[in-house]
Amino acid sequence: MKTFKDSAGRTWTISLNATAVKRVRASLDINLLDVASDGGTLIQRLESDICLLCDILYVLCKDEADKLGLTDEEFGKSMAGEVIDIASAAFLEELVCFFPAARGRLLAKALAKANTHRQKAEQTMLKALDDPRVDQAMEAELAKMEADISADLDRLLTPRNSSGSAPESLA
């Protein structure tokens, strides 16, 4: 069993067993067993959809939430920032422990490798964002947008000369 604290300081326990996996499947139509066979699709989905991760955590912690009289919405309000990282790590550790030894080791290795690559990607992005050429490119794009908007406004606000003659009055 793994634990994490929410932003309100409450400690939550994640305990994965067959019943908990079935509860997640029934409540959210998510099969946690797929994590061992889907090539990382479920893990990627959980990393990109924080709300789904929090929904799974709520289902896994529902007995505790019920004892505290907390709804899923109230639970979700206490899940933000670093709490999500800590809760996600606890969930993934518990997920690894749930599987039989061989599959658990494979999943742990896959998660570690994915984590290493994610950290490298984050470092690469941070380094790229520090490159002065990014600022220069963004400034150039903003200047172009400004010029385009100015030209559009000039075109809209400049009165048009009517050329040609107006039809003669019939009077």
Image: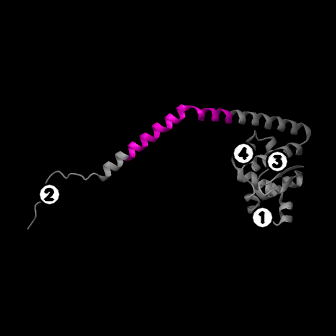
Contact flag, marks 2 and 4 (Cβ < 8 Å): no
Residue 52 at x, y percent in the picture: 73, 53
Give the residue type that dot 1 points to.
Thr
Label 2 belongs to which residue?
Answer: 166
Could you tell me how far apart the alpha carbons at marks 4 and 3 are, in whole angstroms? 12 Å
Contact flag, marks 4 and 3 (Cβ < 8 Å): no
Range shown magenta: 121-149
Could you tell me how far apart the alpha carbons at marks 2 and 1 are, in whole angstroms? 73 Å
Could you tell me how far apart the alpha carbons at marks 3 and 1 are, in whole angstroms? 20 Å
Question: Does label 2 or label 1 sit earlier along the sequence?
Answer: 1
Q: Is 34 contained in the magenta span?
A: no
**Image position of 101 with respect to 51: above or below:** above
**Image position of 168 with respect to 17: above or below:** below
Give the residue type that dot 4 points to.
Glu
Q: Secondary structure at mark 4?
A: helix
Label 1 belongs to which residue?
Answer: 71
Closer to the observer: label 2 or label 4?
Answer: 4
For the stretch drawn in magenta, what is the main secondary structure?
helix
Label 3 belongs to which residue?
Answer: 91
Question: Does label 1 or label 4 sit earlier along the sequence?
Answer: 4
Residue found at x 86% / y 50%: 3
Could you tell me how far apart the alpha carbons at marks 1 and 4 are, in whole angstroms? 23 Å
Q: Is 140 contained in the magenta span?
A: yes
Label 4 belongs to which residue?
Answer: 47
Could you tell me how far apart the alpha carbons at marks 2 and 3 are, in whole angstroms? 78 Å
